[in-house]
């Protein structure tokens, strides 16, 4: 896996401008960032920055020239053991009956409920982020009344949600991600938590992978990604959600809630719960439809994308 050595920072942006600029960088096929983030830099002035991470200084400089932003700042990434640093002070997370901890907190593992271990590493998702914790709370609530048997974790990261569902329900779960490293880490974490036989993991962009089509429909879907992919995947996700099935949408902020909720309510889903963790939202919706064709054709999943990433439904 490539390691980010330099950052390219675009400072002093509005919140919307930071989002728009991040989208521009991610969707420009002439650029090759390892990651793109936005950060609030001055709450009183509502200033944000967009930061792109590159493997080399030359790639960062090429991106600065290509984007026509000479004021953007290039800086080396400190040589830090980020895994060790991320574990420092990382306390266990409790979400309903779920108790998530790192290897450094095995001594406080609970005897009841559903405890599992995920360490920070080379893929996104320790469970401490507000989006993942919100999804675990939503799962705990769903399990009080339902017993899903066909589960999809789309954009699985480190596999937190698929592992939690498989452990709690003692049933198989499918975990997919566009990043092969995330899938590798998910498999490793499933082995660590004793649910590897229950987990099927695959590298897949969007919903077109055969393993997703062949496993559909699902009566529980986790989609903890980002707002724009959630909007683009709305038609496809609704197509593979079984009658009475639940979908947990996350990776969106409070100001994006109405937009994403509308994308799914217009396709017949009904919101049942909204969980807010700081500025992050987990939106739970249900498919109330009573009938669904037994066979799903590829066309039901939306038009194929000509580019990488989640923009393919």
Image: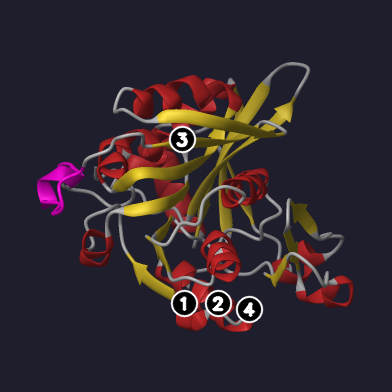
Location of residue 79 (image quadrant) = bottom right
Quick one: label 1 or label 3, which is nearer the N terminus?
1
Question: Spatial distance from mark 2 to mark 1, Cα to Cα?
Answer: 9 Å
Label 1, secondary structure: give it. helix
Residue 193 disc label: 4
Question: Spatial distance from mark 1 to mark 3, Cα to Cα?
Answer: 25 Å
Image location of residue 155, percent across then percent down: 44, 55
Q: Residue at x 57, y 56 (%)?
A: 6
Residue 198 disc label: 1
Image location of residue 190, percent across then percent down: 55, 77
Answer few, some or many: residues within 10 Å of disc 2's Cα (few below 14, many 20 plus, some between 14 and 19).
Answer: many
Answer few, some or many: residues within 10 Å of disc 3's Cα (few below 14, many 20 plus, some between 14 and 19).
Answer: many
Quick one: label 3 or label 2, which is nearer the N terminus?
2
Q: Are marks 2 and 4 in contact (CB under 8 Å)?
A: yes
Quick one: label 1 or label 4, which is nearer the N terminus?
4
Label 3, secondary structure: give it. strand
Label 4, secondary structure: give it. loop
Q: Is residue 45 magenta?
A: no
Image location of residue 313, percent across then percent down: 24, 42
Location of residue 279 (image quadrant) = top right
Q: Residue 101, can we see it? A: yes
How many circles with numbers are drawn on the protein?
Answer: 4
Which secondary structure dominates the residues rendered in magenta? loop
Pointer 2: what residue?
Answer: 190
Q: Nearer the viewer, mark 1 or mark 4?
A: 1
Q: Are marks 3 and 4 in contact (CB under 8 Å)?
A: no
Which scheme is used to colour this image of the protein?
secondary structure
Image location of residue 8, percent across then percent down: 55, 45
Pointer 3: what residue?
Answer: 285
Quick one: label 2 or label 1, which is nearer the N terminus?
2
- The residue range painted magenta reads 292-303
């Amino acid at each position: 896996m490539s390691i980010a050595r330099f950052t390219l920072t675009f400072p002093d942006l509005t919140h919307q401008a930071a989002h728009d600029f991040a989208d521009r960088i991610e969707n420009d096929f002439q650029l090759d960032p390892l990651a793109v983030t936005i950060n609030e830099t001055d709450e009183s002035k509502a200033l944000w920055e967009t930061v792109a991470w590159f493997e080399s200084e030359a790639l960062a400089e090429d991106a600065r020239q290509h984007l026509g932003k000479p004021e953007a700042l290039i800086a080396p990434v400190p040589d830090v053991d980020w895994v060790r640093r991320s574990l420092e002070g990382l306390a266990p997370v409790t979400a309903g009956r779920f108790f998530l901890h790192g290897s450094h907190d095995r001594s406080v593992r609970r005897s009841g409920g559903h405890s599992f271990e995920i360490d920070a590493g080379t893929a996104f998702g320790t469970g401490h982020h507000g989006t993942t914790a919100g999804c675990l709370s939503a799962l705990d609530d769903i399990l009080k009344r339902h017993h899903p048997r066909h589960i999809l974790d789309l954009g699985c990261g480190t596999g937190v949600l698929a592992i939690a569902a498989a452990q709690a329900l003692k049933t198989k779960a499918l975990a997919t991600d566009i990043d092969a490293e995330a899938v590798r880490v998910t498999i490793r974490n499933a082995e660590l938590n004793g649910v590897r036989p229950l987990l099927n993991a695959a590298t897949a962009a969007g919903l077109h992978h055969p393993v997703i089509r062949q496993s559909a429909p699902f009566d529980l879907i986790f989609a903890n990604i980002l707002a724009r992919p959630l909007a683009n995947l709305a038609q496809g996700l609704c197509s593979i959600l079984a009658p009475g099935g639940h979908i947990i949408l996350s990776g969106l902020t409070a100001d994006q809630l109405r937009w994403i909720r509308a994308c799914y309510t217009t396709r017949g889903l009904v919101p049942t719960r909204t969980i807010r963790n700081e500025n992050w939202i987990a939106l739970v919706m249900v498919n109330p439809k009573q009938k669904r064709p037994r066979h799903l054709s590829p066309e039901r999943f939306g038009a194929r994308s000509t580019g990488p990433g989640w923009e393919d439904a």
